[in-house]
Amino acid sequence: MGVFERMHSGKIYDPGDADVLDKQAGYQELLYDYNVTRPREAVKRQDLLKEMFAEIGENCYIEPPLHANMGGHHVHFGKNIYANYNLTLVDDTHIYVGDYTMFGPNVTLATAGHPILPSLRERGLQYNMPVRIGKNCWIGAGAVILPGITIGDNVVIGAGSVVTKDIPSNVVAVGNPCRVLREVNEHDEEYYFKDQRIDYENL
């Protein structure tokens, strides 16, 4: 099994392999170009994202700066996804995000991990596990999603949460480690924030 196959197999490999670094440098060049675009260069940004990402749907907006190990090359975004400043995609293997999901500032999605055994870490070895996020999720500011995690549809992850285990659909989950707080319920159909009612007539 070659190094690129190992990257996506969950097996330990050397991320400092010369072929990996060469590919990564090319991806990082495109990422650099994206991050130096000007605010009014929306078309240029969209064109770059289509070149950078494995898949990206229509009407996605990612506020620079974007950080990505492989420049988004292993990232699969649906449509109508919004990401605020400093989204970090540790995309050494694949990241999947469903339609209409939103990311607050300073969110990290990490696919890469390193062995606990010190002698293996001394050699710079790592492994990768994919991250999957469903449709219509809101990932709050500063949240961290760890390797191998799956988050269902219609999930809210509270700001600052560290997601260490899978999260089911239709829940609010918060904390470190992140735990389900409650289900999305009828109260949420009437109130959008504390005692603030949803004014459906003016939406």
Image (spheres, rainbow, N blue to C red):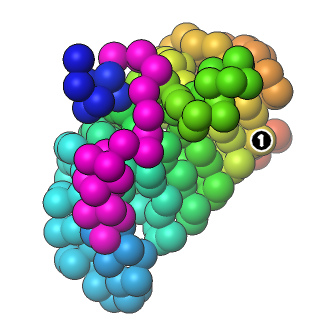
Quadrant location of residue 181?
top right
Tell me if 62 is positioned left or right of 120 in this view. left
For image coordinates 23% across by 17% down, the residue present is 1
Task: Pinpoint residue 84: horizontal percent, then vertical percent.
Answer: 54, 61
- Helix, strand or loop at mark 1: loop
Task: Pinpoint residue 6: horizontal percent, then vertical percent.
Answer: 32, 22
Badge 1 amino acid:
Gly
For image coordinates 49% across by 59% down, the residue present is 67
Query: In the rendered structure, does residue 130 fall within the stretch colored magenta?
Result: no
**Magenta stretch?**
9-29
Q: Is residue 38 above or below residue 71?
A: below
Task: Pinpoint residue 98: horizontal percent, then vertical percent.
Answer: 35, 33
Q: Which of the two residues, 28 or 47, is positioned nearer the viewer here?
A: 28
Query: In the rendered structure, does residue 25 fall within the stretch colored magenta?
Result: yes
- The residue labelled by disc 1 is 160
Q: Is residue 51 above or below residue 114?
A: below
For image coordinates 65% across by 30% down, the residue present is 121
Task: Pinpoint residue 42: horizontal percent, then vertical percent.
Answer: 28, 78
Residue 56 at least partly seen = yes
Residue 192 at least partly seen = no
| Crowd band around label 1 with a 10 angstrom C-alpha radius: few (<14), some (14–19), many (20+) | some
Q: Is residue 191 above or below residue 70?
A: above
